[in-house]
Amino acid sequence: MILKEKIRRYGLIIFLTASVILAIFYLPWRFYVDRMNSSVALALQERVVNIDFLLMGKDVLFVHEVSEITSDAKVLIPVATKTSTLEAIVRKGVEKGKKIGILEFYENEKKLKEIARKYPISSFIRAHLVKPEEYARYDPFSLNQRLIRAVRERSVDFIILPPPPEGWKLSYHQLAFNTYYSLIKEGANYSTFPTFHAVEPPALLKFLAWTGILGIYASVNIGYIIVGALLIPLGNWGYSISIILATLFLYRALKDSRWYLRYLSYVLLALLANAVFSSPEYIGGIMEFRGVKLSLIALPALVGLKTLLKERPRKFKRSDIILFFALLIAAGYYLLRSGNYGFAPTLELKIRDLMDAVFFARPRTKELAGFASALLMDLQPSLRSARWGFILEIIATVGMVSIVNTFCHFKGPIFVHLVRTFNGLWMSGVTVFFITGVWSLWTGKSD
């Protein structure tokens, strides 16, 4: 037992030491890479004086067939869905020195990313298209926030902007200039020929990242280091599984620590995960973290199952069964809201836009609730031991894995991830201390 505790302690020391050293060297490097790739271009359907915007139909082409490629085009956006046609367009475009634009959320996005892995990553850029029919869902402010988010959070390289609807009483030129100056104010570098700069990370950074992750593995069981070592050569899926397992092992290794420390440790794990996936193909958005839904549900589900079986009586009451199904529905809604296609009500979207405008990077709701739950369990331990107190623990784990998931959006600038996480921490802290302070005064138990 003494040896096991020593191994656990040494594993955690390795994790913490590697994380701190990595932060010192990795963050400046990543800031530099993100700054290099902060250029953005605007493509319009007509010329605008004074600023050299890209022109649709001339500089930027939607390409269905290879025969549609022209010599004047700077950017080709393949919109075909047949793999052989896409491969032919990409091959011809790269040979001619054109940039290949991959449309976000378009039906051929996955196929194009698979094809892109066969070519220099600098030949590909990420494009964001505002469809004319989408204007009905926006006003000038909310559209501007959408475009800022596309650049700020996902580092898109150029935006295709159609004319605004007549109801906006805003000319096409005004919309273009407003968007342009908003992006410049955001800190983006405007370019008429957007380019992704592929920068390989120093080997030392990845070594430190893997050292920290394997330290987590060792803190639970020294033999798990072998499992981690076997996952590393497996590439994308191996990396992703290793991070998912690390979220489980770190929770177990810190089971006797204060809740707020357990929560904050996931910020360090998130940084390690981001460094593991710091190769150009991930920062460029050509490859992505695999198993996103699994990474979000694995830890909360295991904690929920463990507490239900361990803490509830052998004979479940009707209220326990109702609670069980309520948790299943909550888990389904949680997954439905997660990811690029997550559902959110219109009112919530407006609140998000406002928070993004005020706080630069809106904290995730999951992280607000997660850290608040962790603090409450530290400040009021009796809450955790209450009949249904384990729900607070589940909510805390949701916030923990959400932090890791935030940093697994590799194409987004890491500065934005840091600000988003920091905003979630301080907002949760202020809210909890205010509520507990008011409650103490109300109940007359304040010291």
Image (spheres, rainbow, N blue to C red):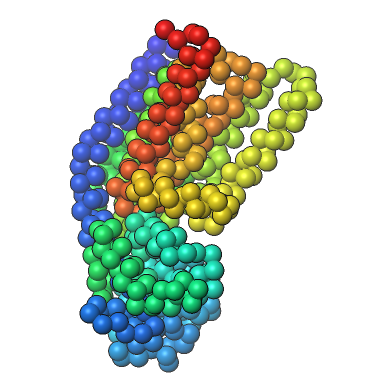
Which residue is nearer to you in this view: 4 or 319?
319
- Residue that sits furthest to the front in the current view: 169
The answer to whether one can see residue 291 in this image is no
Number of marks drawn = 0
The quarter of the picture where the C terminus appears is top left
- Which residue appears at 44% of the width and 53% of the height? 353
163 vs 151: above or below? below
- Image position, residue 218 (x, y; %): 39, 28
The answer to whether one can see residue 322 in this image is yes
Quick check: 102 left or right of 271?
right
- Image position, residue 169 (x, y; %): 44, 74
Residue 294: quadrant of the picture: top right
274 vs 393: above or below? below
Quick check: 406 left or right of 303?
left
- Which residue appears at 42% of the width and 19% of the height? 258
Which residue is nearer to you in this view: 41 or 199?
41
- Image position, residue 123 (x, y; %): 31, 73
247 vs 255: above or below? below
- Which residue appears at 54% of the width and 64% of the height? 137
Residue 3: quadrant of the picture: top left
The quarter of the picture where the N terminus appears is top left
- Image position, residue 385 (x, y; %): 58, 15
- Which residue appears at 58% of the width and 43% of the height? 334
